[in-house]
Image (cartoon, rainbow, N blue to C red):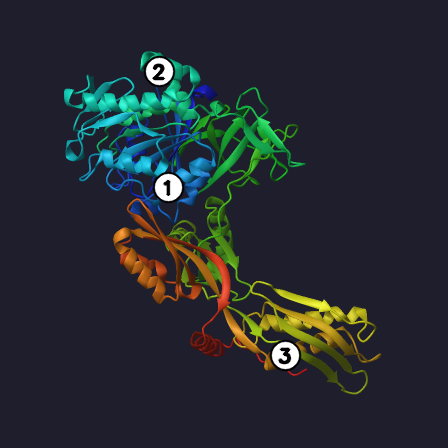
Amino acid sequence: MKVYGTKEIRNVGIVGHGDAGKTTLVAAMLFDAGATNRLGRVDEGTTVTDFDEDEISRKITIHSSLAHCEWNGAKINILDTPGYAAFILDAKAALRVCDCAIVVVDAVNGVEVQTEKGWSYAEEFGLPRIIVINKMDRERADFNQAAAGIVETFGRSAVPIQIPIGSEKNFKGVIDLIKMRAYTFETDDSGKFTEGDVPAELKDAAQSAREKIIDVVAEASEELMEKYFSDGTLADEDLIPGLKNAVKERRLFPIVVASGMRNIGLQQLLSEIVELAPAPDELGTAKGQSQAGGDVVERNVSDDAPFSAFVFKTIADPFTGRITVFKVYSGSVKSDATVFNATKSTQERLGPLHVVQGKAIEKIPDAHAGDIVAVAKLKETTTGDTFCEKANQIVYEPVHFPTPAISFAIEPKSRNDEDKLSQAIHKMLEEDLALRFERDPQTKEFLLAGSGQTHIEVAVNKLKKRYSVEVELHPPKVAYLETFRGRVEIVGRHKKQTGGRGQFAEATCIFEPQSRGGGFQFVDKIFGGAIPQQWRPAVEKGIKDAAARGAIAGYPMVDFRVELTDGKFHAVDSDDLSFQLAGRKAFRNAIEKVKPVLLEPVMNVEVTTPQETSGDILGDINSRRGRVQGMDTRGNQSVVKAQVPLSEMLSYQSTLNSITGARGSYTMELDHYDEVPAQIAQKIVAKAQEEGRIRVAEEE
């Protein structure tokens, strides 16, 4: 495999809404560049970048996948990313190491919700973008409408540099507005085309579209603006460099057209990537922090700079083992090199370097600044780590993921599965940073959390197929809390005499509620020696232990304040345990005199749905005790924002699929806890009694 220098490398991430045709585009690009000998098809499971069993069966991209090809003397590293809401976060991790985003827009549906999400990730990382209007061969494909939607959503900086020849079943080629040449393709999906003059009927449209490009490029600099006003246009020798500079500086986002399925326009797209997408060293220095002080450190993206690299992906390959994928930001690296992991403060021997082509890897001797490579079987390194020279340390910022939207309880089917679960889950968490796994200290359940129900189902399926671990999936038990209303002063007294040394403690406490989210506060207001100083923390411990058991349904009591104001002790019979028990009795006595209530988690929910089903979505949210906060329109989608109790959202995915025909998606995160309505609280308490959650404390 040839090794490429920094100037010859282009790192591009393919982003867009699910079903926009990203993977099909990548398959056609690889075929046209000679990286594959057949045109891969998603429906046939033959694409390079969708190789996972779940991806093939579901016909969707689940994980970002790396491929590469050579075009016009440059190496194009392609990261094909997911577009479905449940997996879109993986696109963010991929774009972290890209130098340009290829934003794919469906010619029929236009800009969709996840198109905007992918765009926002590119914006966050400051990436140039090239927009591809794909599926121009589909029924109801409309270039003008799609382009207008792009401009409306992303601004007038989005400018077509190509226009289509024909549309729908008559789509047969593209017109390059820079060169003013037409490329007409064969109808056999081979990608073969004929270059010619712009068709007469499209000359006016092409000329008008070209003037818009010149207008935007001319605005880029005073020198070009002067030439534009002087000559009324820009010559090619000014237009082409000006265009590349405008793309690099994110003042222009070129729009091109294609059909991945029919293999039309992909060779022109490859050429535009090489011509317009910046090389890794053209976007400025790589910025990180020093290991010690956290000061900003900058590195030139050059072989001459000290070596540094960022690990952005880990692949748990069943045959090769752990594969670590990283981008070399500065310097160069050879196979079998020993590098310093600045994140873990440890040395790692890399072993052979590889380039990745879907699920296949191929050895290379070395890699230069800007390239993306992989190594196998590292011991300490995980996603988000930084490699560098020990004498020239730098740490690059990892990608941060939001709190998962939904969690499910998982239960191993057998003791054998239970033994293997932890190790299998650990490997999956290395591969998928949007997953979380934890044991709920309150409900004692193992919880697997992710971006949506589909995300969790895919993870469970992977546990079974890849690691032979079978688990049952249950909706999680809602983590209710308890609190109380009212203020009360209580004396907690513990006395036990059994002959010989006894137990005695008395604590006078004032219990009062705090505002929601206020937590627990214990205030020692004893003046003098009513209770010796060393035993006062025991009162607090006793109250906290009792509060953790709850009062009405066995859930922890929160948001209250206790003032310890007085007490009594015995010189012989008092001890730490006695005051703990006095604190517990004070808590139980207080609960009998105040009004305890149940609290439930309330989630911020954002539902994205086709406009025609938004009314049904609003009705369904209201039926779930939800409070609608507002509704926005994005293209032909509606986004409903609401606050809904978590207990009402546990089975929401199936309802959403039913209402929207599986075209809707949602995210949610915890906002606050609120009081449970009385009639629902009664059912929760009754269920807690059935399950034996309520434990009556022993009389000490």
The reply to whether discs 2 and 1 touch (Cβ–Cβ < 8 Å) is: no
Specify which label sits upstream in the sequence, 2 or 1: 1
Q: Residues within 10 Å of mark 2 (few under 14, many from 20)?
A: some
Q: Which mark lies nearer to you, 2 or 1?
A: 2
Specify which label sits upstream in the sequence, 3 or 1: 1
Q: Which residue appears at 52% of the width and 65% of the height?
A: 444
In this view, 636 is above or below 8: below
Image quarter for residue 619? bottom left
The C terminus sits in image quarter: bottom right
Q: Which residue appears at 47% of the width and 66% of the height?
A: 478
Image quarter for residue 73? top left
Q: Position of residue 4 (x, y in %)?
A: 44, 21
Q: Which residue appears at 51% of the width and 44% of the height?
A: 400
18 vs 594, nearest the viewer? 594
Instruction: Look at mark 2 in the image and give the residue it sits on.
Output: 228
In this view, 670 is above or below 27: below
Visible residue check, residue 59 = yes
Visible residue check, residue 32 = no
Q: CA distance from mark 2 to mark 3?
A: 82 Å
Q: Position of residue 409 (x, y in %)?
A: 45, 62
The N terminus sits in image quarter: top left
Q: Which mark lies nearer to you, 2 or 3?
A: 2
Instruction: Look at mark 1 in the image and give the residue it sits on.
Output: 116
582 vs 419, nearest the viewer? 582
Instruction: Look at mark 3 in the image and give the residue it sits on.
Output: 590
Q: Which residue appears at 34% of the width and 22% of the height?
A: 215
Q: Position of residue 458 (x, y in %)?
A: 38, 51
Residue type at mark 2: give it: Tyr
